[in-house]
Image (cartoon, grey):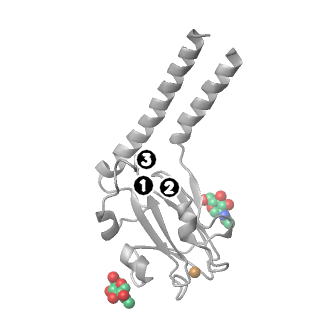
């Protein structure tokens, strides 16, 4: 392998390593935003995303007609907007994900949630296959996403692990690069 090819391989591995620790911004409904027009399937939208702690969720909508309420699972299921955990009304609301599990949102305008304006942001651990999400996350009220996680033993190890994965990948890339170099 030519040196330039090895350099490219190394660069790609570096990019892969850094991608792991990069925070993403997810706009709910993509270009359609947060609306009841067009029967947007927010469940389908959420299913195509890979939500991670550190990512941001943006709700963009016309504040005259909609709002964003963070609610419990029970309230999400029954479209009950009577006592939301938090309410946002700017028309361009950003929520930073600070913990794992389900984060439920709905539009509190009467009839809108029933019409499908509700979304479940499920943040799974990186090693989701090995560690199933605790069932308590489904039943208990979730703390607001825009408030730092109350117990550091929930959020912090993840960030450490996340960084760890990046460093590990970087190390593997470096070893691969050195191996390629010596066998040239
Ligand atoms: C909506 O939720 C509130 C608070 O949990 C509860 O008191 C109320 O009975 C619920 N309303 C309906 C219609 O389920
Ligand atoms: C909403 O806010 C984001 C930054 O949080 C910004 O990039 C975007 O342009 C804003 N959109 C509108 C319609 O104001
Ligand atoms: Cu609405």
Residue found 67% across the figure and 25% down from its top: 8
Find out whether the residues at labels 3 and 1 contact each other: C-beta distance under 8 Å.
Answer: yes
Rendered-image quarter of ligand 2: bottom right
Numbered label attached to residue 57: none
Circle 2 sits in a helix, a strand or a loop, which is it?
loop
Residue found 57% across the figure and 36% down from its top: 16
- How many C-alpha atoms fall within 10 Å of the one at disc 3: few (<14), some, or many (≥20)? some
- The residue where tag 2 is placed is 51
Residue found 63% across the figure and 82% down from its top: 64
Whole-percent x, y for residue 28 in the image: 59, 66
**What is the C-alpha distance between the residues marked 2 and 3?**
10 Å
Find out whether the residues at labels 2 and 3 contact each other: C-beta distance under 8 Å.
Answer: no
- The residue where tag 1 is placed is 124
Whole-percent x, y for residue 140 in the image: 30, 69
Please identify the residue farthest to the bottom as the structure is shown. 110
Residue found 35% across the figure and 56% down from its top: 149
């Amino acid at each position: 392998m030519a040196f330039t090819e090895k350099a490219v391989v190394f660069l790609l591995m570096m990019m892969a390593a850094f991608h792991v620790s990069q925070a993403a911004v997810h706009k709910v409904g993509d270009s359609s935003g947060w609306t009841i027009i067009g029967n947007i399937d927010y469940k389908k939208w959420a299913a195509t995303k890979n939500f991670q702690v550190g990512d941001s969720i943006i709700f963009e909508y016309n504040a005259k007609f909609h709002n964003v309420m963070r609610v419990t699972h029970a309230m999400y299921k029954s479209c009950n907007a009577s006592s939301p955990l938090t309410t946002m009304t700017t028309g361009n609301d950003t929520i930073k994900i600070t913990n794992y599990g389900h984060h439920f949102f709905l539009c509190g305008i009467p009839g809108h949630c029933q019409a499908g304006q509700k979304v479940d942001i499920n943040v799974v651990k990186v090693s989701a296959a090995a560690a199933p999400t605790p069932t308590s996350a489904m039943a208990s009220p979730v703390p607001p996403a825009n408030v730092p996680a109350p117990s550091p033993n929930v959020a912090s190890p993840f960030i450490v692990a996340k960084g760890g994965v990046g460093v590990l990948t970087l190390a593997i890339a470096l070893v691969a690069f050195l191996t390629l170099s010596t066998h040239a």
